[in-house]
Amino acid sequence: QVQLVESGGGLVQPGGSLRLSCVASTVIFRLYDMGWYRQAPGKQRELVAVITSSAGTNYADSVKGRFTISRDNAKNTVYLQMNSLKPEDTAVYYCNAERTATLARYWGQGTQVTVSS
């Protein structure tokens, strides 16, 4: 079992920035593909960004050019740098860890991001 703990959410004005962090409780963090998802009220959970075990990245079209996902395998941590935030980015953001070889999939508890003036 892998535990994921997110932090860094909060209230920010439109145009502002936030950095989310997610720490994973596994010694084989480097083998996991890590992702950030979000879920707004009344909407389905959607993929925001993913970074593979080999550091390849992919982003939702709605965040390309504004968000950056990165990972630090020495710290078992994945980050989501969010710039130029918009009100429509308001959601609960969830960290996800997946390992294709074992079909393992884990979720964090979520962190609230609110973009409002």
Image (tube, rainbow, N blue to C red):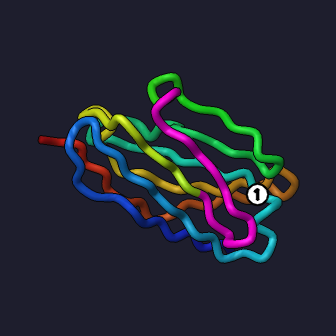
Quadrant placement of the N terminus: bottom right
How far across and how far down the image is residue 60, in percent? 53, 29
Q: What's under tag 1, amino acid-wise?
A: Tyr
Res 91 quadrant in image = top left
Q: Tell me which segment is drawn in magenta.
A: 65-78
Residue 109 lies left or right of residue 31; in this view the side is: left
Q: Count all numbered tags in the image, as a single digit.
A: 1
Task: Quickly name the residue at label 1.
Answer: 32
Instruction: Classify mark 1: helix, strand or loop.
Output: loop
- Relative to the observer, which residue lies in front, 65 or 40? 65
How far across and how far down the image is residue 10, in percent? 28, 58
Q: Residue at x 71, y 54 (%)?
A: 98
Residue 72 lies left or right of residue 6; in this view the side is: right
Residue 70 shown in magenta: yes
- Relative to the observer, which residue lies in front, 24 or 103? 24
- The answer to whether residue 66 is above or below residue 91 is above
Q: Which residue appears farthest toward the top when viewing the image? A: 61
- The answer to whether residue 8 is above or below residue 64 is below
